[in-house]
C-alpha cells in the first residue's frame, strides 16, 4: 500500500514540477533580457499556456480528492440542452483554440430538457472537447450530436483525431491512467476521464467510449430526460 502511495506521489510531483520548471526558465529569460521585443512577448505567451496546464492539473487533483472523500454536492435544475451545449461550444472555441478546429452541433429536437447540474455537466463536455483537441493535433473536426433514446438523452462527441489504441481502451476511465501517446505528447495527471465518470454517476448518468480507431474517437454522455415545463 505504502509503495503504491509513494509511486503515485512521485508521479504527481513529476507532472507538477515540469510546468513549474518551464515557467521559471521562460520568466528568467525575459527578466534577464535574454529575449526582448516580440520574442519576449512569445515567451510570456508560453508562460501563460504553461500556467493553464498547471492550473488544470491542480484542479483535477482537488476534484479527485473531493470525490474520494464524498464532498461533492450536486445542484439539479432544469436545463435546455440545445442552448446549454451551444453556449459551451461558443465559450470553448473562444478560449485560445486553433482556428483550424471546426465544431459542428446537431440536435434532433428543437428543445431537449433535463434535470442536471450544469456546472458539473459542463466539466464533462469540456474535458472531452479538450481531449479531442489534443488527439487532433490542433487541426480537425468535432461533431456533437444530441438525441433522445427511450427515457434518456444522449450527447455524442466525435473527433477526427488519431484514436485510442485498442490495448488502452479498457483502462481510459481508470484514475491516473495515461496512454503511451499522452505520456510523451500531452501534459496531465490522467484524472480527466476518471473525474468525468465520477461526475456522471453523481448526475445519475454515464459516459462511455462508443468507438475509437485511427480515424477518430466517439464518446457518449447519457442522462435521464424530463418533460419541459410550460
Image (spheres, helix red, strand yellow):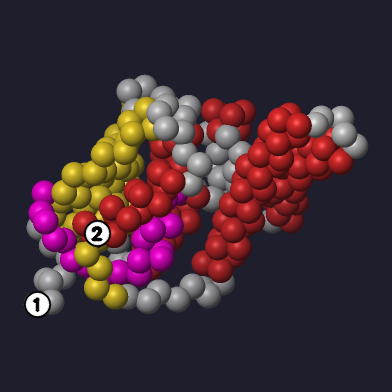
- Horizontally, residue 179 falls left or right of residue 35, namely left
The total number of labels drawn is 2
- Horizontally, residue 226 falls left or right of residue 188, namely left
Residue that mark 2 sits on: 83
Direction top: furthest residue: 214
Magenta run includes residue 223: no
What stretch of residues is rendered in magenta? Answer: 108-127
Query: The C terminus lies in which quarter of the figure?
Result: bottom left
Q: Position of residue 12 (x, y in %)?
A: 69, 48
Q: Of 36 and 201, which appears nearest the observer?
A: 36
Query: The N terminus lies in which quarter of the figure?
Result: bottom right
Residue that mark 1 sits on: 230
Q: CA distance from mark 1 to mark 2?
A: 17 Å
- Horizontally, residue 38 falls left or right of residue 83, namely right
* Sooner in the amino-acid sequence: mark 1 or mark 2: 2
Q: Secondary structure at mark 2?
A: helix
Within 10 Å of disc 2 (Cα), the crowding (few <14, some 14-19, many 20+) is few
Identify the residue at horizontal 30%, vertical 69% (top origin). Answer: 116
Q: Of 23 and 13, which appears nearest the observer?
A: 23
Identify the residue at horizontal 59%, vertical 58% (top origin). Answer: 59
Identify the residue at horizontal 35%, vertical 69% (top origin). Answer: 117
Amino acid at each position: 500500500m505504502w509503495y503504491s502511495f509513494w509511486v503515485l506521489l512521485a508521479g504527481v510531483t513529476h507532472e507538477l514540477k515540469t510546468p513549474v520548471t518551464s515557467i521559471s526558465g521562460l520568466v528568467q529569460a525575459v527578466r534577464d533580457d535574454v529575449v526582448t521585443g516580440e520574442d519576449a512577448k512569445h515567451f510570456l505567451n508560453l508562460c501563460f499556456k504553461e500556467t493553464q496546464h498547471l492550473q488544470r492539473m491542480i484542479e483535477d487533483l482537488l476534484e479527485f480528492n473531493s470525490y474520494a472523500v464524498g464532498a461533492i454536492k450536486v445542484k439539479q435544475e432544469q436545463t435546455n440542452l440545445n442552448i446549454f451545449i451551444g453556449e459551451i461550444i461558443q465559450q470553448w472555441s473562444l478560449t485560445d483554440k486553433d482556428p483550424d478546429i471546426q465544431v459542428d452541433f446537431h440536435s434532433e429536437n428543437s428543445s431537449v430538457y433535463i434535470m442536471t447540474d450544469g456546472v458539473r455537466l459542463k466539466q464533462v463536455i469540456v474535458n472531452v472537447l479538450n481531449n479531442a483537441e489534443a488527439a487532433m493535433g490542433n487541426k480537425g473536426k468535432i461533431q456533437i450530436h444530441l438525441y433522445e433514446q427511450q427515457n434518456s438523452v444522449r450527447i455524442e462527441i466525435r473527433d477526427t483525431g488519431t484514436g485510442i489504441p485498442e490495448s488502452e481502451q479498457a483502462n481510459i476511465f481508470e484514475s491516473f491512467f495515461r496512454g503511451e501517446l499522452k505520456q510523451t505528447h500531452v501534459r496531465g495527471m490522467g484524472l480527466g476521464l476518471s473525474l468525468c465518470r465520477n461526475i456522471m454517476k453523481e448526475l445519475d448518468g454515464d459516459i462511455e467510449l462508443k468507438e475509437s480507431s485511427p480515424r477518430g474517437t466517439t464518446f457518449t454522455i447519457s442522462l435521464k430526460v424530463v418533460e419541459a415545463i410550460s
